[in-house]
Image: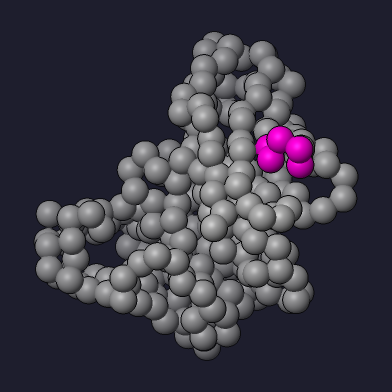
Amino acid sequence: AQSVTQPDIHITVSEGASLELRCNYSYGATPYLFWYVQSPGQGLQLLLKYFSGDTLVQGIKGFEAEFKRSQSSFNLRKPSVHWSDAAEYFCAVAPTGGGNKLTFGTGTQLKVEL
Amino acid sequence: ETGVTQSPTHLIKTRGQQVTLRCSSQSGHNTVSWYQQALGQGPQFIFQYYREEENGRGNFPPRFSGLQFPNYSSELNVNALELDDSALYLCASSDRTQATFTDTQYFGPGTRLTVL
């Protein structure tokens, strides 16, 4: 069965600083990979997704993520964080060719200091 | 284009009762998935419906059941509520047009269920 690990429960960064959120997955093959963001009282918004091809994926709001097969990782990055980026971030996987039933990590809560 | 909507926003029930949660899919979407998000956890897949048929189920007991209607709206029903059912219930819709199922899921704001 697939699983996702987000090792950092909470992360605090200063506005304007760079950000990297870690995600490791366990799956027998290369899964489909996603990053979602959830603000308080809101549903999940898709930031970016990886299915195949170029391992560096660009998303919305200036986010990008890099798929590294050798490390089973799909870390999310942003070069300069804005105060509005404070939210909870979830990494998720879906099996290739098996439907889009997502398995989520436990999330990383991002706090941005002004 | 309207997004995914869910009702009600909040709900309080007592143990043993039954509850129905509703979801309206984004226009043109034929697939709906339901997820349970307990406090401090990531969402967990409950089940998925594609063109009114159940198309996969997570590790949830049969007292969790669902329906998808011809207009692709959906219901999640939970019988014999337990305290641990307290959670945010998220609905996600997508448009399954490709065999590889690379469709993107769009989530609603959720229904917060509290079981006392």
User: What x and y, as percent, mark residue B41?
Assistant: 40, 43
| Residue farthest along the right direction in this orientation | A54
Q: Residue at x 70, y 28 (%)?
A: A77
Please determine whether, in this image, residue B74 is positioned above or below residue A74.
below
Q: Residue at x 46, y 40 (%)?
A: A106
Q: Residue at x 51, y 85 (%)?
A: B53
B97 with respect to B46 (left or right): right
Q: Is residue B4 visible?
A: no
- Residue B107 place in picture, x, y as percent: 53, 57
Q: How is the image coloured?
A: one colour
Out of B60 and B23, give the one closest to the viewer: B60
Q: Is residue B113 left or right of residue A66?
A: left
Residue B22 magenta-highlighted: no
Q: Which residues are magenta?
A: A69-73
User: Residue B87's x, y, as percent?
Assistant: 31, 52
The quadrant of the image that shows the N terminus of chain B is bottom right
Magenta run includes residue A70: yes
Depth check: B6 or B68 in front?
B68
The quadrant in which residue B77 appears is: bottom left
